[in-house]
Image (cartoon, rainbow, N blue to C red):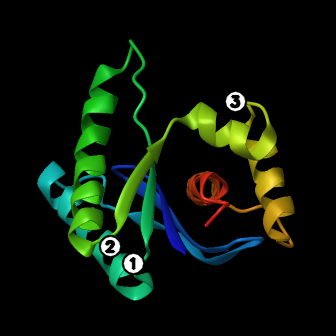
Amino acid sequence: MIILGIDPGLQVCGYAVVEHKLLDTKLIEAGVFRTDGKAELAARLNQIADDIEQVLKTHQPDTVAVEQLYSHYNHPRTAILMGHARGVIFQKAAASGASVRDFAATRIKKSLTGNGRATKSQMQLSIQSVLGLPEPPEPADVADAIAIALCCASENKNL
């Protein structure tokens, strides 16, 4: 099973492709997409759509896993803008034929560390250990995308 994990962002969007087998999960590719922060919202969403579509075509994942939105009372606009990016990602994933799953940040953290409130560095060290990487994954957007894909893989360990 090929899983594409996505940490949605309007300016920086992390992605990670993992191959999951019954007793083994390996990282195939990970990186970030960047949009022009000065561009109009529609242009930024279009860039995200193009970038996601390219990864979907290249890797043909069975499942696309995306982090759920959370909203902070002091910054509701951020959640609304992120919803636009998630919508584009969901649409492109559905059009590709992949199933789409989303996971809460606390669930992702708990699946890797046993602690739903784990820090970024704890998550990066857990990912390094699970995948046998020589270094913790960087930047944080990539680490988050890998964690999302690994969370999805752990939910499918019987496949």
Q: Check disc 3 and report the residue beneath it.
A: 116
Nearer to the camera, 128 or 94 = 94
Nearer to the camera, 46 or 83 = 83
Q: CA distance from mark 3 to mark 1?
A: 29 Å
Q: Check disc 2 and report the residue beneath it.
A: 51
Image coordinates for residue 96, horizontal then vertical, percent: 26, 74
Q: Check disc 1 and report the residue beneath it.
A: 55
Say which amino acid is labelled 2. Asp
Q: Quadrant of residue 1?
A: bottom right
**Residue under the point 32% across and 61% down:** 35
Q: Nearer the viewer, mark 3 or mark 2?
A: 3
Where's the C terminus, which quadrant? bottom right
Q: Quadrant of residue 45?
A: bottom left
Badge 3: residue crowd in 10 Å (few <14, some 14–19, many ≥20): some
Q: CA distance from mark 3 to mark 2?
A: 30 Å
Up the image or down, 85 lies above or below 157; here it is above
What SS does tag 1 mark?
helix
For the residues labelled 2 and 1, say whether their Cβ atoms are less than 8 Å apart: yes
Up the image or down, 107 lies above or below 66; here it is above
Image check: 88 left or right of 151? left
